Amino acid sequence: MSRNALCLLLVCFAAGCRDAAPPAAEPAPAFDLPLVGGGRVSLDSLRGQTVLLDFWATWCAPCLLEIDELNALQEELRATDVRILAISIDTLPPEELARWVAEHGIAYPVALASVDLASAYGADAFPFHVLVGPDGHVRERLESGFHDRIELRALVARHAAPE
């Protein structure tokens, strides 16, 4: 190896250019939440499925823009083991939120939670997306803000089980 190549290798190593091991998957914070329209959903009930959690609120403009994106993705994923679960941090009464969800044509399940659960998942703004693997561990968090169906589909694809 030439001296220049060795120097480049050492500089690259010192700067962190080597392949980094992926971070260990952390257990997703547990939840047991009421669903809009009735019933409940828990993290344990979703074991065996990949779940895209969408933390959102009715007062969040980017969240509203994502409804059509998430509806389209829900349709694409219907035949897979990937689920979308929207978790509303609204303080609206459940009946009012249920009416709002119906009026806006949300086709995926919506659960009710407090901002504390969103914070436990790392949310600092909304919308906020977290992909949880079939084992109940966090696979990836996206940066807060609007993400279209192409970005959300890519998130799922990065962690999909091989066919």
Image: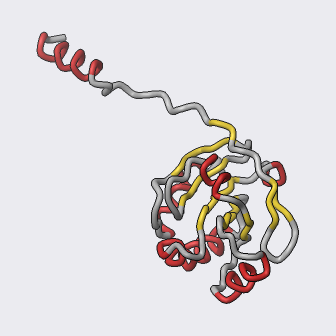
Residue drawn at (63%, 46%), measured in percent from left and top? 120
Residue 97 visible somewhere in the drawing:
yes
When the figure is inspected, residue 62 is found, relative to residue 29, above or below; the finding is below
Looking at the picture, tell me which residue is in the foreground, 36 or 82. Answer: 36
- Most extreme residue toward the bottom is 103
When the figure is inspected, residue 59 is found, relative to residue 85, above or below; the finding is below
When the figure is inspected, residue 61 is found, relative to residue 83, above or below; the finding is below
Looking at the picture, tell me which residue is in the foreground, 157 or 32. Answer: 32
Residue 162 visible somewhere in the drawing:
no
Which quadrant does the N terminus fall into?
A: top left
Q: Position of residue 159 (x, y in %)?
A: 58, 48
User: Would you identify the image quadrant in which residue 54 lies?
Assistant: bottom right
Residue drawn at (50%, 59%), measured in percent from left and top? 125
Residue drawn at (67%, 89%), measured in percent from left and top? 103
- Most extreme residue toward the right is 39
Q: Position of residue 64 (x, y in %)?
A: 53, 77
Q: Position of residue 21 (x, y in %)?
A: 48, 28
Query: Which coloring applies here?
Result: secondary structure
Q: How many marks?
A: 0
Residue drawn at (73%, 66%), measured in percent from left and top? 112
Q: Position of residue 129 (x, y in %)?
A: 56, 57
63 lies left or right of 1: right
154 lies left or right of 133: left
When the figure is inspected, residue 111 is found, relative to residue 96, above or below; the finding is above
